[in-house]
Amino acid sequence: MGTILALAPLLLLALGGCGLMLTEAYASFTKAREEGASAQLALPSAVTMLAAAVMALGLWLKDPATIDGAKALEPWLVVDRFTVFFTMVTCLGGALATLLAGGYLPEHNLDRGEFYPLIIFSTLGCVVLAAAGDLLTLFLGLETMSLGVYALTGFRRSSRSVEAAMKYFLLGSFAAALLLYGGALLYGATGHTDLVGIGQALTKGGRLPYPALVFAFALILVGIGFKVSAVPFHMWAPDAYEGAPTPVMAYMSVAVKSAGFAMALRVLVTTFGDPKFGSWATGWPPILALLAVLTMVIANLVAGRQESVKRMLAYSSIAHAGYVLVGVVSVMKVGSEAQASVLFYLLAYTVSTIGALGALVWMGSRGKEATSYEDLAGVGRRHPAAAFAMSFFLLSLAGVPPLGGFFGKLYVFRAAVGAGFYWLAVIGLLSSVIGAYYYLRVMVYMYMRESAPGAPEAEPMRSGMVVSALVISGIVVLWLGLMPGASLEMAIAAAVK
Amino acid sequence: MVASFAPIFLLFVLAAAVAAGMFGAGHFLGEKLPSPEKDMPFECGNESSGAGHAKLSVKFYLTAILFVVFDIEAVFIYPWAVTFKELGWTGFLTMLSFLVVLVVGLAYCWKKGALEWET
């Protein structure tokens, strides 16, 4: 019984996904292809994912450590507060992205019901990935998560979208293969597939020489770097994000990235947490610090040069991976507070990104999408509510108090300072100043420019679901900004031991 | 340990050298008399019938992937059936849930027309 209780969010997602899949195939309304058919599936799937998030909250309140049956799942699935926290984040991200899709898909004539089972199964993969305590379940979760997203990326079936999906699929499978190869080497070196067992065996020395272990770690790091789109493994991201339908882009940059960081944290802390691998002098932190610096600086510089707002947000999502990496670097020195900063950042980033992309979805309608800066000229006058929502979430992404994004950045940089990496915090601060430039540029276009006569103007759409997704994200962003202490304490309790 | 594999490596090297030597000798020393018939792609001796890059219907792909799914299912069921008694109710319920998931997938494919060959 306890096992089922511990698995409740996962089971709910699996059953909900299967149910929606059959509904989509057998129900008459989807066959008739009446207007808004997919909107009828959007609400149930968003509710399924929100319910999974609420169940995870229930597990949190009960404390998964006290559930007897949860131990029976180890080492394959580890149901601890870390898992439960990421279940909440990814399910919330998935639910909000689904709400955006409920408005976006009918509006842009992409009204096909397969979207919803795919996004639910993909979220299931995210949760498994966050919970994975064994290389096998880790790979299973990674592939379940990715397969759904590959298909969703090519959902539009235009050549742009298909190109994005192909690019993402090929590079994604390549990265998964590298991760698998690294895992195979680790298994060969230690005789274990569970992360804790590998970690203990590595502490004792392992059966393979040290260079082979370094090679295995490098392969795993490349796999992780790809999933969280850290520079220099980010090349696929802008094209895949721009080609994908906007709600899918929101989902990819939010849930997939959070699950990738969950995997990264668990693998780095439990498997490579030994001082031999985890200290600054002989371990992985300097490598990750280099990745963090490259990601923050390059992504922010390139984002400022984009002409498309969607592509700018794609680069901004890469840049945010850099800020999160700053927290990950500090994990071995500061411990649970650095981990908590990562978790808090990911939560704040999730709602802010969904909000910004949701506002972008809201501003456009069929044939009159808002993609470039020029499209947004004058939106502040023509559609003040959408412009306000956009500004609100962009300010949170830029890290302006008192919004959630500010405290995310504050905690991450505080962790770096606490670990003694002042230079890392300084580079992070400087690059977030660069970041503020392109976020503010959007606002300048919305409020201070008028569209050129005869130029195409973005025309806002009407959708209750998009607005409700914006309202939910807005409430969470404000809550994180006004009362950051409560969620930070949650995040501290969620840290991997 | 490395030393005990040395003969095998030696064999690899020898095999590669012999194969490369024979093909190389044929390539560099042999006489070449190209003719239009010889330059044609070889298709079992018949006249070649068009380009090799024909478009295949996606139906083949669907059938193949469905075959793989149910093939794997059989692979899982055999060992389960052999140890059916030892696994008891836990094993039965686990296999049942696995089969239910597959049946859901089958029902979906059926309704979506993936099993129809002539449409």
Image (cartoon, rainbow, N blue to C red):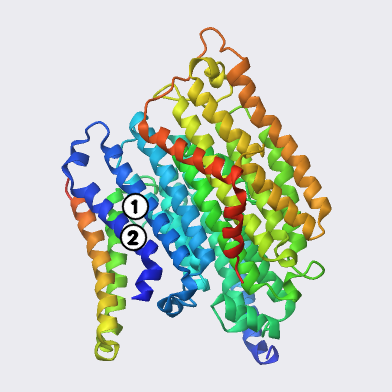
Horizontal and vertical percent for residue A159? 44, 35
Q: Compare marks 2 and 1 and give the one earlier in the sequence.
A: 2
Horizontal and vertical percent for residue A51? 36, 54
What residue appears at the point 39 percent right and 60 percent down from the top-left corner? A55
Towards the viewer: A228 or A359: A359
**Is residue A92 left or right of A285 when viewed as pictured?**
left
Horizontal and vertical percent for residue A32? 18, 36
Mark 2, Cα crowd under 10 Å, few <14 / some 14-19 / many 20+, is some
Residues under numbered marks 2 and 1 in contact, where contact means CB atoms less than 8 Å apart: yes
Residue A48 is tagged as: 1
Work out whether A104 lies above or below A490: above
Horizontal and vertical percent for residue B32? 56, 56
State which chain disc 1 sits on: A
Work out whether A140 lies above or below A359: below
- Residue at the extreme top of the image, as rendered: A453
What residue appears at the point 43 percent right and 48 percent down from the top-left corner? A94
- Where residue A368 sits, quadrant-wise, is top left
State which chain disc 2 sits on: A
Mark 2 falls on what kind of element?
helix
Towards the viewer: A257 or A433: A433
Three-letter residue code for mark 1: Thr
Q: Is residue A446 visible?
A: yes
Three-letter residue code for mark 2: Leu
Mark 1 falls on what kind of element?
helix
Towards the viewer: A74 or B3: A74
Same subunit: marks 2 and 1:
yes
What residue appears at the point 55 percent right and 52 percent down from the top-left corner? A257
Q: Which residue is mark 2?
A: A12
